[in-house]
Image (cartoon, coloured by chain):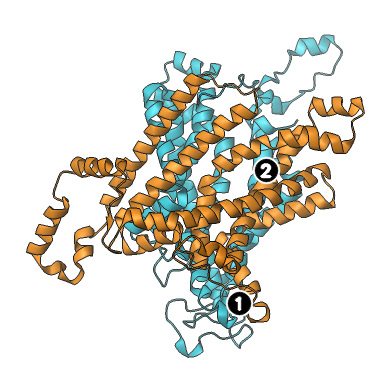
Chain colours: A cyan, B orange
Amino acid sequence: MSINVPPPLPQDPTKTLVTPPVDVLDSAGAPPVAPGMDAAVPTRSMFRRGLEVFAENRLALIGLGLLVLIFVFAFVGPLFYHTDQIHTDLLNNDLHPGSPGHPLGTDQSGYDELGRLMQGTQISLELGLASAVVATVIGTLWGAVAGYVGGWIDAVMMRIVDAALAVPLLFLLIVLATIIHPTKVTMILIISMASWLSISRLVRGEALSLRVREYVQAVRVMGGGGTRIVLRHIAPNAVGTIIVNATFQVADAILFIAAISFLGLGLTPPAIDLGGMLSSGVAYTNDGYWWLIYPAGAMIVLIVIAVNFVGDALRDAFEVRLQRR
Amino acid sequence: MTAYLIRRILQSLVVVWLVTVFTFILLKLLPGGPVRAILGTRAGNFALVKSLTHQLGFDKPFWYQYWHWLDQLLHGNFGFSYNLNQSVGSLLAAALPKTLLLLGVSTLIAVIIAIPIGVVQAVRRNKFADYAGTAFSFIFYAMPAYLLGIILINLFAEPPRAWFPSEAAQGSNVGSFFTQFNAMVLPLASLALITLAGFSRYMRSSTLDQITQDYVRTARAKGASERHILYRHVLRNALIPIVTLLGLNLPIIFSGALITENVFNYPGMGLLFVNSANTQDYPVLLGITVIVAVATVAGSLLADILYAVLDPRVRYVSA
């Protein structure tokens, strides 16, 4: 906006690493060993360096490992541990953990709690990932177009974003959830309709600084149109910012879905997500039925922490601005 | 600065106006419509539906309805909740102070606790205290407000340790916040812990930023004691970003309050909002959305202005 614009960033260090002409090296007596296959392919070296930084980060590896375990639990688990999550079994409801055939007990409708945890995690992950992807695509396009086109179109597009962001996301989500009957698909739409906003702001900022770079001017000189510049040049160069934020978006989306379900505006049974499990378990806290709450709650916290570890490390690794080396 | 201010205030007004347009459009999309909701079982009577639609002005064009609503809003009339048979204004007058009290007190507690935690973490960087603080704030940062509320109820409101009621103060006037303060301990703690987590993380990095500045080295060279440097130099500068954070964090704090009010059944704005969503009571939804949006926009405006006042190096230019 109108806060003093910082001086333009120094050029991406990897891109200024031009291999000196061979004869210069020869005259200096240095062996003409290619000093950087990497330097010749800047994007690849940047990617590889990013991966190295990521791999050095122990928390990131823990987070990644946790995520893999959670995915295996949610998607592979049900293949080996068969449970009926559609038909109620009222004769066997509220069984304690450790009951025969039900290692985590059963809930108030007789659903096996371990199987339900698998299904809830699965749906939470699916919805979280899908809505993060949709939100990222919408936000990236919106922000890139606004930042690239500029002028009054930019002003209008960004005031729309400002207006939508002025209402806290949770309030917006609740309004949307009252209007649209939440199924899996509409839930993804609801969440992404509310969460593309912050991404669009970030991408617009990137686009503003990218549109004045030489290579964009070069594309224009060569006759490349606006669509091509936005899709092929601006969006890919903002990819670090976009990926990092998409990662955090997954965690946010899972939390938002859980919040909506917790407030009773979520998916309709028998479909259930982690927030829905919490919501139905809350009524039984006074009875001491901890297994209806804590496994689902712990799963939410674990997913969010793991995603944040990975996101932080990705940011260290791929956001050139923050790169220390 | 003045030019920037005027520009910024105009922008905020445009944003608030757009919010009213969007919310109005969104809520017009509600299935069923308010007339059938009001009539309930009598909605089958077509003549009745038609006359009430006419009486309430829902047969007028969209822009006319919007204009009428905006006009009333600017005159302080938020509309009428048919579901609760009360004016939205009176509902808000009862709920808003309760929410503000909950928000204010819990944020105050959070800030008072978060500042020392963040500073200690920064000073003892990469030592045990730092890691402990990071782990603590990370857990509460990742913990959804509803889960924390349930855990607190489980821990401190049930038989072995039933120290506090699990339901927040229910009295109809604001004073019940204080007269039944025992009942407010858990909601306050739950909201404060959530806010605290973000604040202490921020305070830590803000202090770290300051500790590495040149003026700290200069102060050390002068022979100032570490305590003096911390209190007189570092802390004052490190607190500046916290002021803006308070303004910018309003949406997060509002959302936290909404959840907390629902967990503890505290009759504030958040509970009213969710109940209205469940009964599709759209005048109430509209009114609360507008109020929350105005507060959010005002918060970020104030944060910008305060930042410039507190840090003379920041000068805004009107672009």
The CA distance from mark 2 to mark 1 is: 34 Å
- Judge left or right: residue B234 versus residue B191: right
Q: Residue furthest left?
A: B47
Q: Is residue A182 above or below residue A169?
A: below
For disc 2, the neighbor class at 10 Å (few under 14, some 14 to 19, many from 20) is: some
Q: Is residue B3 above or below residue B159?
A: above
The subunit carrying tag 1 is: A
Circle 2 sits on which residue?
B202
Number of numbered discs: 2
Have a look at marks 2 and 1 and say if they share a chain. Answer: no
Residue A72 visible in the snapshot:
no
For disc 1, the neighbor class at 10 Å (few under 14, some 14 to 19, many from 20) is: some
- Coordinates of residue B127 in the picture (x, y in percent): 85, 48
Q: Nearer the viewer, mark 2 or mark 1?
A: 2
The subunit carrying tag 2 is: B
Q: Observer-nearest residue: B117 or A142?
A: B117
> Under tag 1, what secondary structure?
helix
- Coordinates of residue A179 in the picture (x, y in percent): 32, 56
Q: Amino acid at mark 1?
A: Trp
Circle 1 sits on which residue?
A290
- Coordinates of residue A128 in the picture (x, y in percent): 50, 55
> Under tag 2, what secondary structure?
helix
- Judge left or right: residue B38 versus residue A264: left
